[in-house]
Image (cartoon, rainbow, N blue to C red):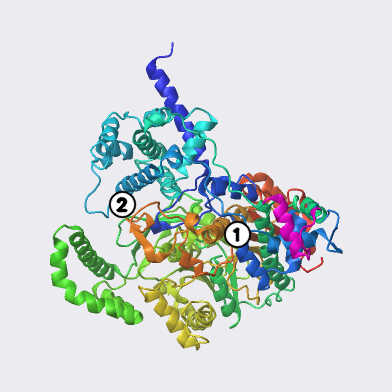
Amino acid sequence: MTTPADQRAVDRTRVRAEISVAARVLTPVWPLGSFIAVNPLGGLEHRPFHEALVAAGDLYGAEGTLGESRFRAAHAAGRITSHDLLEALERQVPEAVRAAPVEIAGRVRTPAEVLTADLLHGSIPPAPTRRLLTRSERTCPHTAAAIDALTAKWCSAFLDPGQAAWSLPGREHGFYRAWADLAARDTTLPPVARRNLRELPSDPADAVTTALHLLGVGYGGERIAYLRAHLTRLPGWAGHVLWRSNSPGSGIDLVDYLALRLSYEAHLLDASRGVPDLDPAPAPRATSRSDRAHLAARALGAIGRNADEEADVARILDHMPVASRPLVWLDAYETNYRRGLLARLRDPAPSSTSDRAEAQLVLCIDPRSEGLRRHLEGLGGYRTFGFAGFFAVACRIHGLAKGDPTVSAPALVTPQIDLYEQPAPTARGEARRTLAGLNSLTATTDAVHTAKADLAAPFVLAEILGWANGPAAAAKTIAPRHVRRWRARVRARIAPVARTVIDTASSLSLDQRVQIAETALSVMGLTTDFARLVVLCGHGASTENNPYHSALTCGACGGNAGGPNARAAVDILNDRGVRDALSGRGIAIPDDTWFVAAEHDTTTDHVVVLDRHQIPESHRDDLERLVGDLAEAGERLAIERSALLPGAPVSPEPGAAARHVDARGADWAQVYPEWGLAGNAAIIIGPRAVTEGVDLRRRCFLHSYNADEDPSGSALETILTAPVVVAQWINCQYYFSTVAPRTFGAGTKTTHNVVGGIGVVTGPGGDLRTGLPWQSVAVGDHLAHEPMRLLVLVHAPHERIDAILARNPGVRDLVDNHWITLLARNDQSPRWHHRTRGGWTPYPTEIGE
């Protein structure tokens, strides 16, 4: 016999399972401090790309591509050609292209001409609208808005990471309990609602079940759809709660979140309205079939209306529904860029000579590294490699000043290693002075922050410091570079930088370090022909007053600068015991090879060599030559980047360009400190000879790979299942922040309000904004980022790639469902082939192929 307690347990299990299913459409939203670019539609990657876009429209009211007016403007400007459109039509709607020709105004027209006329002159359909609605959205929009405001208020209060002056009472008991204890006392709610909220169950799953019953929501698919409607109403807060729920002890999950929303809805709506209509809202109406045919016929010269001609045109257009037109445009847009890229890769620069390189540099696969690599290689006998910027050391870094560790690892990896920054053996006294100075600076900062958060202290603080704040603000605005240098000098006097090391041997066994070293060198393809200097160069960024600073740093390092990872990897690779073990595994590092850590500032294009005190005297001259060439390469890159930065001087001299980009990074009012990864469009996996000497315009991720040295395919499998996936996340983040900025972007920086360290909202409140600010992808109405799906170019045998895809269904879904385009070629077959569901087919790289 089932007891009431047994039934409640069953109901709780069921509703939790239903919430888990409903939440599959969500993507976790990381906090600002460790911003991780993700695919906002990551929960839909198991579906074909075009179906996912339809779902995004139904769930969020989001656009899935650029608007047709932008595509038409691109066609008029030559960014999309008629040949591009023809190729796209042949791929997207082959039945339509193969239809019978039609006669219009006495002239025979091909199906392609009819379809092109519709693309160029057809009525633009209305924007998608959210169709999966909650009951309050349907019947009482102001109640729906009130629920959203309450959700944002309580989520921000609970999730604040300790920055608020007053902590939410009861937060130690978890989100649901803290909210339930306080919600009934909220005098902004109607008395009846407050009375009902006092009777909330102790378990949030019970609260969800009760609220769904009061709202008239049934079971099975109807319930899952309704839960999903609430989860997608505020995807920012829901996504962040999803991210938090994966951390032990967070005190909040989506059951708690939905208990709040559904309880408010059940008790704020008038229960007398009866059972609501829960079917999806109707889709926006598009142009009628006959009107669409008329517009296409008129564009092709028809005079007046001819029923027979329009019927023939309509039969062709039936093969290309209006909803599929944006995908044709997107295909053509991508084709134009890809043809140009592949043409430049057809005849790559010859491989470097067999002479020993002056130095080898391993940089992150980030497209911004491509420019530095290209300019440095142009200065002399340097060879560069591309590898994920964490250098195979996924870890938690504990800095010299202690505090919370920095998680410096890709989002796909949970680090199991703790590494500690320690004073160098001869720098104990330096470290003590540094720590004392840092403690003084921290105490001062904390005191000011506490005073600002107090009720009365801000008035006293204004009286004491107000006379200085005005001139200081003016100086930061007028001369940002000088203010930054002055602050650096003051900091250096108070807390001088101590010589430190990251001693991996104290945290990792020899076997662990050897495994890391072998993995890194094998996957990056650096196992022979070592130079005297091998530099592992991470990257970071320097900006002021920028909540999205971590979006400009290294994604492979969890939104942190890559210098610490480079230091750790160098410590491993310079270890004699590690080298001896590697030699036994076929990787012989010469005795005169020394690994050096460095960090590239992508905002200023400065490269800083780290741990100089570790570099032996025998290599100092080599290092100084390299440092000089890196400075020159950075100046050349600054000129190149300045041409695209709004407000930058036109055709600046090298020194002027370097000063300008440096000033942008120091300017607290600068909303365009750099372009980040705007423009990213492809990842190239292969030897440097394929791209050496080619200006890729900082649009391609570059990962080194030599198929001949990887007969098992293990290195390629690592690349396809990790760096390629991360590159696809980044690509999708930029894509959807551009095509659907209101839904998947963060809006304009000028209206941002930072919520603790969680994220930003627009104006006084509302949903937590996901994605990138508009200033990361555009200047006004001019797009700096061209939203295209990621092109993956691999130099490896087809059968090796097929075997990897067969073992990794997640990556295979990205390929088969057209989230990415995978092309491959090898030495035996120099022509590019396209991987489709049906196998490999030749990919045209020239018009007419």
Are the two marked residues, 2 and 1, in contact with CB atoms closer than 8 angstroms? no
- The answer to which quarter of the image holds residue 221 is top right
For the record, the magenta segment spans: 288-307
- The answer to which quarter of the image holds residue 124 is bottom right
User: Is-magenta flag for residue 290?
Assistant: yes
Task: Tell me where residue 825 appears, x and y as whole percent.
Answer: 74, 61
Front position in the image: 49 or 378: 49
Question: Which residue is labeled 2 in the image?
Answer: 161
Task: Tell me where residue 47 appears, x and y as whole percent.
Answer: 63, 45
The numbered dot on residue 523 is 1
Q: Secondary structure at mark 2?
A: loop
Asked whether the viewer can see residue 173, the reply is no
For the point 17% across and 76% down, which residue is it? 467
Task: Tell me where residue 24 appears, x and y as whole percent.
Answer: 52, 41
Q: Secondary structure at mark 1?
A: helix
For the point 23% across and 79% down, which residue is it? 471
Q: How would you rate the neighbour count of disc 2 (Cα within 10 Å): few for under 14, some for 14-19, many for 20 or more?
A: few
Question: What kind of residue is marked 2?
Answer: Pro
